[in-house]
Image (spheres, helix red, strand yellow):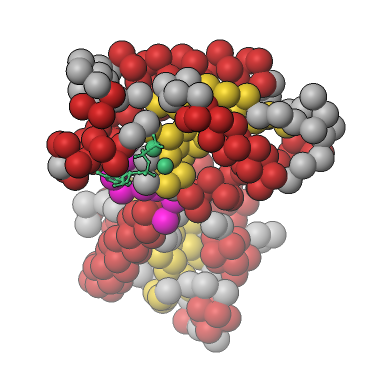
Amino acid sequence: MRILVVDDEPLSRHVLQAAVEQLGHQWTAAQDGEAAWQCFNQDKPEVLITDLLMPEVDGLELCRRVRADTRAGYTYIILVTVLGDRHDVVRGMEAGADDYLIKPVQLFDLQARLIAAQRVTDLHAELDRHRAELAHLARHDPLTGLGNRRSLGEDLAVLHARSQRYRRGFALAMCDIDRFKAYNDAHGHQAGDQALRAVAATIAQELRGGDSVYRYGGEEFLLVLPEQTLDTALVAVERVRSAVERLAIPQPAAGPGGILTLSAGIAALGPGEAPTAEELLKRADAALYRAKAAGRNQLALAHSPAR
Ligand code: GH3
Ligand code: MG
Ligand code: MG
């Protein structure tokens, strides 16, 4: 494990360092609480072994700061104190320490504490992994790996608020695969899933930095294009449309030699315009409907009330 050893008395510190090293762990050392806090921030250690009484930032304060740190990973804290200051240990445990040792520290006692520390930090690492996995699952669509409807809602709210505050525009494009029901009917649902994955990957690949794509529904994808106007969004979405066409996925419903295509409706929020994100989505959806009605495999721009 990576262990940070803190003690203002050089001798105690060296004894601890030697013991930690003998037990096969890596260590860094600090001679006071403030230096320890800096070491902690640089390279969050798995274990902190700290003297309780130190000038200025003492062991208690260090415990509090470490526990207030919100980064992933758990630092197991062992307080070290002299027998006479034992009563301070309880305050230290309340401040976030996990265990304590009485000076002079015996190798055997340290070894036992570090076995417990390893178990606890391993458990926390596993919890962190599960938490990250859950957070990912909550925001992503399992089939395509794209952001899901929920993450779209969250991201769009942030973008919309920012656009209002800083008077920045953005564009949305609602894309929908053409005659996808027929594709499924002809090739089966599994092939349909594969086509969805291919289209999703292609859209993601065609987007430029700062733009994002979400799976809005079954065969619908929503592109979010910050800082874009209707005209510039049109160029970006046309790039996406033609890339999907170039995949040349056979689509029987499009006639002999037909391929799978995409239609899209684009809406943009001009700087200083006030519609809600929902209103903008509605406009993009209405434009998509017109693209479909006009024959599919094409884009349509939303009519904003101002235009
Ligand atoms: P249009 O050109 O008007 O958009 O026609 P469409 O057939 O694409 O539209 P419709 O809304 O009638 O059908 C969408 C189809 O998309 C129906 C459904 O079976 C298919 N679909 C939706 N989600 C999935 C999915 O996760 N996997 C597969 N394989 N198909 C899906
Ligand atoms: Mg469709
Ligand atoms: Mg649809």
Residue at the spot 77% in from the left edge and 42% down from the top edge: 275
Q: Position of residue 6 (x, y in %)?
A: 49, 56
Examine the image and state in which quarter residue 267 appears: top right
Quick check: is 194 in the magenta stretch?
no
User: Which quarter is ligand 1 in?
Assistant: top left
Q: Is residue 42 left or right of residue 134?
A: right
Q: Is residue 142 magenta?
A: yes
Q: Which residues are magenta?
A: 138-144
Rendered position, 58 above or below 95: above
Q: Quadrant of residue 219?
A: top left
Query: Would residue 217 appear left or right of 57 to someone viewing this image?
Result: left
Whether residue 44 is visible here, answered yes or no, is no
- The mark tally for this picture is 0
Q: Is residue 252 left or right of residue 281?
A: left
Please say if 156 is above or below 106.
above
Image quarter in which the C terminus is found? top right
- 48 and 225: which is toward the camera: 225
Q: Nearer the viewer, residue 255 or 37?
A: 255
Please state which of residues 92 and 105 is positioned toward the viewer in this rendering: 92
Q: Is residue 198 left or right of residue 293?
A: left
User: Looking at the image, can residue 61 be seen?
Assistant: yes
**Image point (47%, 81%), residue name:** 83
- Determine the image quadrant of residue 143: top left
* Residue drawn at point x = 77 percent, y = 27 percent: 270
The percent coordinates of residue 191 (x first, y second) are 17, 37
Q: Position of residue 227 (x, y in %)?
A: 68, 24
Q: Main secondary structure of the magenta part?
A: loop
Could you tell me residue 90's position as x and y percent?
Answer: 53, 84
Going 50% across and 53% down the picture, which residue do you hit? 150
